Image (spheres, helix red, strand yellow):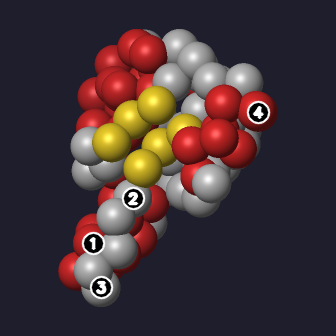
Amino acid sequence: MTWYGCSRPAPPSCSSKTTAKRSARSPRDELRPEAAEAVAQLRRDGHHSAMLTGDNHTTAAAVAKDVGIHDVHAELRPEDKARLIE
């Protein structure tokens, strides 16, 4: 996944709660701790955040929920992403 707030690989010290939350997505898609706050700050500053990803809908929805993004577009090819941001 290529968007701000995503880091690889997942830290080895994950709690069982984190592991359960991660079950809907690949272990490689572990979020940075500051991702939700970054999205919240963008919202406070008047910006709209959307997720454009090639990941499946289940994975995209899980990641978006964790960071507070409500506008999710999943299973996109690069040309689909380009069309959406034009």
**Helix, strand or loop at mark 2:** loop
Q: Which residue is rendered at x = 32% and y = 48% of the image?
A: 69
Q: Earlier in the sequence, mark 2 or mark 4?
A: 2
Q: CA distance from mark 1 to mark 2?
A: 7 Å
Q: Can you identify the residue that label 4 sits on?
A: 78
Q: Can you identify the residue that label 3 sits on?
A: 45
Above or below, 12 relative to 40: above
Q: Which residue is rendered at x = 27% and y = 50% of the image?
A: 68
Q: CA distance from mark 3 to mark 2?
A: 11 Å
Quadrant in the rendering for residue 38:
bottom left
Above or below, 50 relative to 34: above
Tell me residue 9's x, y (percent): 72, 38
**Cβ atoms at labels 3 and 2 below 8 Å apart:** no
**Cβ atoms at labels 3 and 1 below 8 Å apart:** yes
Q: Earlier in the sequence, mark 3 or mark 4?
A: 3
**Cβ atoms at labels 1 and 2 below 8 Å apart:** yes
Q: Can you identify the residue that label 2 sits on?
A: 49
Q: What residue type is disc 1 on?
A: Arg
Tell me residue 63's x, y (percent): 41, 35
**Helix, strand or loop at mark 3:** loop
Residue 15 visible to the viewer: no
Within-10-Å neighbours for mark 1: few <14, some 14–19, many 20+: some
Q: Can you identify the residue that label 1 sits on?
A: 43
Q: What residue type is disc 3 on?
A: Asp
Q: CA distance from mark 3 to mark 1?
A: 5 Å
Q: Earlier in the sequence, mark 4 or mark 1?
A: 1
